[in-house]
Image (cartoon, coloured by chain):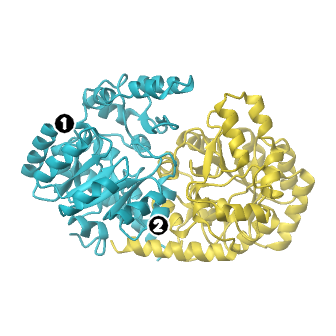
Chain colours: A cyan, B yellow
Amino acid sequence: MSDRWPDNRVTALFGIEHPVVQGGMIYQSGAKLAAAVSNAGGLGLLGAGSMRPDLLREQLVKCRGLTHKPFGLNLPLFFKHAREAMEVALEEGVRIFFTSAGSPKKAIGPLKEAGCTVVHVVASPVLAKKCEDAGCDAVVCEGFEAGGHNGREELTTMVLTPQCVAAVDIPVLAAGGIATGAQLAATLALGADGAQIGSRFAITAESSGHERWKQAVVDAGPADTQLVLKSQQPVRLLKNDFRDQVTNAEARGAGREELAALLGTGRARRGMLEGDVEGGELEIGQVAGLMDDVPTVAEVFTRLLTGYDEACRRLGAGE
Amino acid sequence: MSDRWPDNRVTALFGIEHPVVQGGMIYQSGAKLAAAVSNAGGLGLLGAGSMRPDLLREQLVKCRGLTHKPFGLNLPLFFKHAREAMEVALEEGVRIFFTSAGSPKKAIGPLKEAGCTVVHVVASPVLAKKCEDAGCDAVVCEGFEAGGHNGREELTTMVLTPQCVAAVDIPVLAAGGIATGAQLAATLALGADGAQIGSRFAITAESSGHERWKQAVVDAGPADTQLVLKSQQPVRLLKNDFRDQVTNAEARGAGREELAALLGTGRARRGMLEGDVEGGELEIGQVAGLMDDVPTVAEVFTRLLTGYDEACRRLGAGE
């Protein structure tokens, strides 16, 4: 562990060097990305939400071959293969689980019995407290600016983070709007113990996303994402033809079934894995407008730490 | 000026001690509040947007009697008395103007000719750059979490601030989601030169808002505000009967005229000045959920500085 973060509860919890967790995003977070993040001193997560159990097993074995450092698994609890994925991961020795999209109450029992560290993703301080009461080891609080699926509360990282820090005693990782070292410093200033970073790691050389998808994000302007389906299942997307279809359907009052059909998982695969950047579903955060290249994971960490130190120096003038 | 901020461009620009500007909010920001903020070392602003020219003159004279420190005026450019308010303020010696809601291009000429410092409020880096090109001395970038009128871009303070800092060379004040010293530190970590704080100063002893309105904010829970009228003129409100009327009207597709009638200025006066906390329009930011008392302005500054120092120490562990 680094002497940059001597008392940090996130580095201590996971046995990592820097308090940075990579979000386990569907279609982007395979063995290559997770291992690269763990090798760079963060915590890499495989994204189980887009893998059948056999592919997940293959990726877990591969990841163990690529790094000797800790890594974990992101598991969306509504995922149809969630139970099988959990079993496969436990068999393959995974002991760090980040669960999302749903209540962690049911899932946490078997995971804690197996000796796992369990972290749940929340969008409100009320749910953060429920996670603590259920036995979670930490929470990720994800703000309105985050990419992909999002809370209905619309609380931003700037407000949600101190709310969650006040609500629980377990460590809080902030997520949403964090792509630079300045933003990492801001979240720690807000009282978070670390950050979960998604979008920035999606747009790296090691992400398994398609090159055309990565380029679409590089080309995006400052306000080129939108949170759609706010009344049903909010999700933040890059603006493209597919986003237009969704907003048009919403505007004319399309029912839950029609919207669900439009948002079938095939669309996300088409967009982010197969590179259909107009017809596919492109999940990315507001930081899309702050990213203008596709660096390696190692380079992202160099920038994060440099930017963090610069931010500390800006504030340090006041000490 | 304080040695806490030796090179700060906001304290230098306004000749103030701390890089904190009080938002010039309607029905809250009279002479008493603005003078208290200026006396505490920040920059107080009178809110011209809810004053007839004669009342504005009275309040400006009163404010000059209450403080010998610099203070300024917030002027919404769409306000029906905007031109008269500007003339009155210039006659009364005001030389610091914060303009909002519209393009500063037309207003800036006469103000700069009169030797004024002019700052415009923006919600995107594109408009920030236009303000710089038009001759503004600084910009306030106001994120999605802010109370009252808001941008359509929905960019949060965490993302908007670094975007604006990258877009312009003039000082940037962050606004939206800033009520505590930790949040002030976060905005400076993001590269802002200072903060404009609205909601926290609205809920102080010196604010001219009604006691019932202040208590409604104190009682508010973590997710009790909502940005409504997103497609027309977005405004963030505390949830109450009036908010329900607006969202119901929106949901059934009410036209622009009906919504405008519902949102007539009488409603804001009724809610925030007269204390009708169910029938009135209550403009407050997401930080409503972080405020649990009605302190004096001096106490707010004590907390801001203490919290700022604590945040610096949290980050300073990494130096």
Q: B169 or A291: which is nearer to us?
A: A291
Asked if one can make out residue B103 in the rendered structure from this viewpoint, the answer is no
Residue A236: quadrant of the picture = top left
Q: Is residue B40 shown above or below A165?
A: below
Residue A115 appears at what percent x and percent y? Answer: 18, 64
What residue is drawn where x is 56% and y is 57%?
B177
Q: Which residue has dot 2 on it?
A: A167
What's under tag 1, amino acid-wise? Answer: Arg
| Vertical order, B146 against A131 (above or below) | above
Mark 2: secondary structure? helix
User: For residue A235, what is the image quadrant?
Assistant: top left
Is B58 in front, or is A138? A138
Outermost residue to the left: A65
Q: Amino acid at mark 2?
A: Ala
Percent x, y for residue A116? 21, 61
- Residue A13 located left or right of residue B37: left
**Relative image position of residue A193 (x, y in whole percent):** 36, 66
Between B43 and B112, the residue placed more toward the observer is B43
Residue in the image at 77% along x and 58% along y: B95
* Image side of residue A185 versus residue A70, left or right: right
